[in-house]
Image: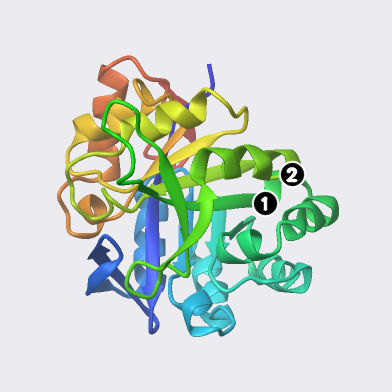
Amino acid sequence: MLTKRIIPCLDVKGGRVVKGIQFRDHRDAGDPVEMASFYDREGADELVFYDITASSDGREIMRDVVSRVAEQVFIPLTVGGGIRSVSDMRLMLNAGADKISINTAAVENPELIKAGADHFGSQCIVLGLDAIRSKNFSTHDPHWTVRIRTGNAGGIEAGLDAIEWAVEAVKLGVGEIVVNSIDADGTTEGYDIDLLKALAQVITVPVVASGGAGIKDHILEALTNGKADAALAATIFHYGTYSIEEVKEYLFENGLPIRMNLDNGNGKIR
């Protein structure tokens, strides 16, 4: 069985890490370079860096910040925000990213997924899927739609069914999906397990759960009942609710395969 991954997320706005609720009311959480270095030492399995207003502002990602973050970490780094072309992808990979996350650009130009996978391999291309529950369906028959340009007060509707879009993106070459529930984002009330289950039924690439972690049980539920391959979290790590080690120990105690760090810096599977 593959190990489950714990991934802190750095949402960066104006050169600072921020955290909001449902993509609004952002508050400062710290310096991205210092936080990246801290999470690397703490035993994070990967790190995600999102320039959350690059797409909504119509500008390029903060390459200098990405480069400084990459210099501080020795774990896989996924970078997203404002990436619109294969050239942009190459710039981020050259700046130190291991994976490229695309959301708005992928919706507006789906062929970008295929082009990126052809140039760099599917393992480098991550779909950032920002999904919100449709009010036109009951809780017993949930559906989700896609939003783009979400760095600007929750974004705009893309007119796509989230599950159908995920299936199409995988066909085009996406190697992983980070699915963020807009409804749950920043609430600390738990991931959208129904959304994770719905994705697990129809796609074969790894799914990273995002949006809503407040307690360790939420992460456990996403990785078990939700069938996610990894859990991304921000609030509980940024503001010291839990350390990464505490979360990993809890998951291990509950029977999940987890990579733990030894004092000498070498990882072991428990």
Look at the image and tell me in which quarter the C terminus lies. Answer: top left
Tell me the residue that label 2 is attached to.
173
- Check disc 2 and give the amino acid type: Gly
Query: What kind of residue is marked 1?
Result: Ile
Q: Is residue 184 left or right of residue 132?
A: left
Single out the mark in the foreground, 1 or 2.
Answer: 2
Locate residue 11 relative to residue 200 in the image: left or right. left
User: Is residue 67 something that shows in the picture?
Assistant: yes
Q: Is residue 57 left or right of residue 204?
A: left
The residue carrying pointer 2 sits among few (fewer than 14), some (14 to 19) or many (20 or more) residues within 10 Å by Cα, namely many
The residue sitting at the front extreme is 136
Residue 193's x, y, as percent?
Answer: 32, 31
Give the residue displayed 56% in from the left and 85% down from the top. Answer: 59
The answer to whether 57 is drawn above or below residue 127 in the figure is below
Residue 267 position in % (x across, y down): 47, 34
Q: Identify the residue shown where x is 26% and y is 48%.
A: 184
Q: Position of residue 189 (x, y in %)?
A: 17, 43
Name the spot of residue 67 as percent of width and height, x first: 57, 74
Q: Quadrant of residue 103?
A: bottom right
Q: Report if the CB atoms under discs 1 and 2 are less than 8 Å apart.
A: yes
Placement of 79 over or under 270, stated as above or below = below
Label 1, on which residue? 125
Above or below residue 193? Residue 105 is below
Q: Quadrant of residue 142?
A: top left
Give the camera-side residue of 22 and 60.
22
Q: Using a 10 Å C-alpha cutoff, classify the residue at mark 1 as few (fewer than 14 neighbours), some (14 to 19) or many (20 or more).
A: many
Give the spatial CA distance, label 1 vs label 2.
8 Å
